Image (cartoon, helix red, strand yellow):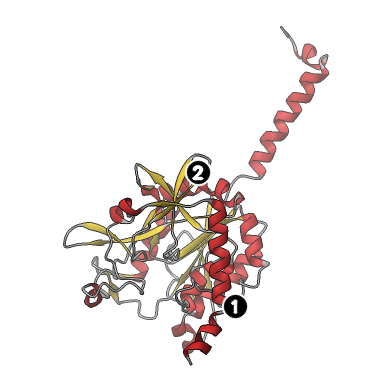
């Protein structure tokens, strides 16, 4: 038993381990996990009210910033906008005003003006997020991400999220982008994951520092290279929101959703606060229309097609990705045969 400071000094090993512990604490403090969140805010008509709650876009933005500031990681928020409407508003965020002509603004190019500032921050944060102003990413979503992301990313898989809206008539939540039920799954380290091979677009993206730097260094970081999901091309704003997830990019083998009690993990669901898509394509629902995002036909508890589930191996997923990419590159041949 050591009884004095002199006793500690007389034991070199104790000194070494004490210094090592202090160094470890110092490193933890210096490398404290943090996240940078960038939000494009298109606000051409500040007084216009939207959604079933009849709120302005600023109302949704303000509510979402308050929500994001509750995340357990130190969070810096950057709002990218095109006018001076936010200049006198009290927001716990950094406001960046961009000079952009009306034509480019209406087309959606504001969403791409977030990237130069994000790129400057590549060494300053542990995580990077691009987020639409009315997508309510919560602490539950963050913990879900931190729980699964590291293991999946080491195997080149993307952790999926699903966006939902509430139908005020039946008080049920419906998927916005998933218009067909998921039928395939894969097991990784004894955990079952559903494969989102329908649509992995979810109005935002989040990457760790390594993934983000890979993204910046790729040809997909700039606007010139188009992204798609082998079914259709994305528009200007969607190409920004899809990030590095698009299927033709091939950075990820597949997008996976963890299974809990034969359902998708409930923490993968994120609310679209404006709630203005549910009735947007209501005339198409009776036609069983499946090729457009926004047709809210599937309740979030029915996203999985339990009776038709098929297991795929990781090797099969690699092969699927290769064949989809190959067929897409050779799609010009089908046009020749049609002619």
Q: Percent position (x, y) of residue 70?
A: 43, 49
Describe the element under mark 2 as helix, strand or loop.
Answer: helix
Decide if residue 6 is in sight here: yes
Relative to 132, does residue 189 appear above or below in the rendering? above
Q: How many marks?
A: 2
**The furthest residue to the left:** 169
Q: Describe residue 201's horizontal placement relative to residue 56 as left or right.
A: right
Relative to 54, does residue 27 appear above or below in the rendering? above
Q: Percent position (x, y) of residue 139?
A: 43, 48
Q: Nearer the viewer, residue 270 or 97?
A: 270
Quarter of the figure that contains the N terminus:
top right
Decide if residue 121 is in sight here: no
Q: Nearer the viewer, residue 123 or 308?
A: 308
Q: Which dot marks residue 147?
A: 2
Residue positioned 79% across, 25% down in the render: 16
Relative to 339, does residue 32 appear above or below in the rendering? above
Q: Describe residue 174's horizontal placement relative to residue 259 as left or right.
A: left
Residue positioned 60% across, 78% down in the render: 225
Q: Describe residue 170's horizontal placement relative to residue 221 as left or right.
A: left
Describe the element under mark 1 as helix, strand or loop.
Answer: loop
Q: Which dot marks residue 225?
A: 1
Q: Which dot marks residue 211?
A: none
Q: CA distance from mark 2 to mark 1?
A: 32 Å
Q: Quadrant of residue 231?
A: bottom left
Say few, some or many: other residues with alpha carbon within 10 Å of mark 1 (under 14 / 14 to 19 / 20 or more).
Answer: few
Say few, some or many: other residues with alpha carbon within 10 Å of mark 2 (under 14 / 14 to 19 / 20 or more).
Answer: few
Q: Nearer the viewer, residue 285 or 274?
A: 285
Q: Describe residue 176's horizontal placement relative to residue 1 as left or right.
A: left
Residue positioned 61% across, 49% down in the render: 154
Q: Percent position (x, y) of residue 246?
A: 52, 68
Q: Quadrant of residue 7?
A: top right
Pick whichever of labels 2 and 1 is earlier in the sequence: 2
């Amino acid at each position: 038993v050591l009884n004095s400071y002199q006793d500690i000094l007389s034991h070199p090993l104790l000194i070494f381990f004490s210094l090592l512990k202090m160094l470890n604490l110092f490193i933890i403090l210096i490398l404290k996990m943090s996240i940078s969140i960038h939000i494009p805010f298109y606000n051409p008509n500040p007084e216009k009210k939207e959604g079933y709650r009849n709120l302005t876009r600023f109302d949704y933005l303000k509510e979402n910033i308050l929500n994001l500031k509750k995340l357990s990681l130190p969070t810096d928020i950057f709002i990218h906008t095109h006018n001076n409407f936010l200049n006198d508003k009290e927001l716990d965020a950094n406001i960046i005003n961009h000079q952009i002509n009306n034509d480019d603004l209406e087309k959606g190019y504001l969403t791409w003006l977030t990237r130069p500032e994000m790129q400057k921050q590549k060494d300053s944060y542990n995580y990077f997020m691009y987020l639409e102003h009315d997508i309510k990413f919560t602490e539950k979503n963050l913990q879900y991400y931190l729980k699964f992301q590291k293991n999946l990313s080491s195997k080149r898989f993307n952790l999926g999220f699903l966006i939902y809206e509430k139908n005020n008539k039946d008080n049920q939540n419906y998927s916005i982008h998933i218009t067909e039920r998921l039928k395939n799954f894969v097991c990784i380290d004894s955990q079952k994951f559903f494969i989102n091979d329908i649509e992995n677009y979810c109005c935002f993206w989040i990457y760790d520092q390594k993934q983000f730097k890979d993204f910046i260094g790729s040809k997909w970081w700039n606007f010139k290279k188009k992204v798609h999901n082998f079914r259709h091309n994305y528009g200007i704003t969607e190409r920004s929101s899809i990030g590095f997830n698009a299927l033709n990019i091939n950075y990820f083998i597949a997008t996976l959703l963890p299974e809990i009690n034969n359902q998708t993990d409930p923490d993968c669901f994120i609310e679209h606060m404006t709630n203005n898509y549910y009735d947007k394509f209501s005339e198409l629902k009776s036609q069983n229309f499946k090729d457009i995002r926004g047709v809210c036909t599937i309740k979030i508890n029915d996203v999985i097609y339990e009776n038709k589930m098929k297991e795929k191996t990781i090797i099969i997923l690699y092969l699927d990705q290769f064949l989809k990419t190959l067929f897409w590159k050779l799609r010009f041949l089908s046009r020749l045969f049609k002619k």
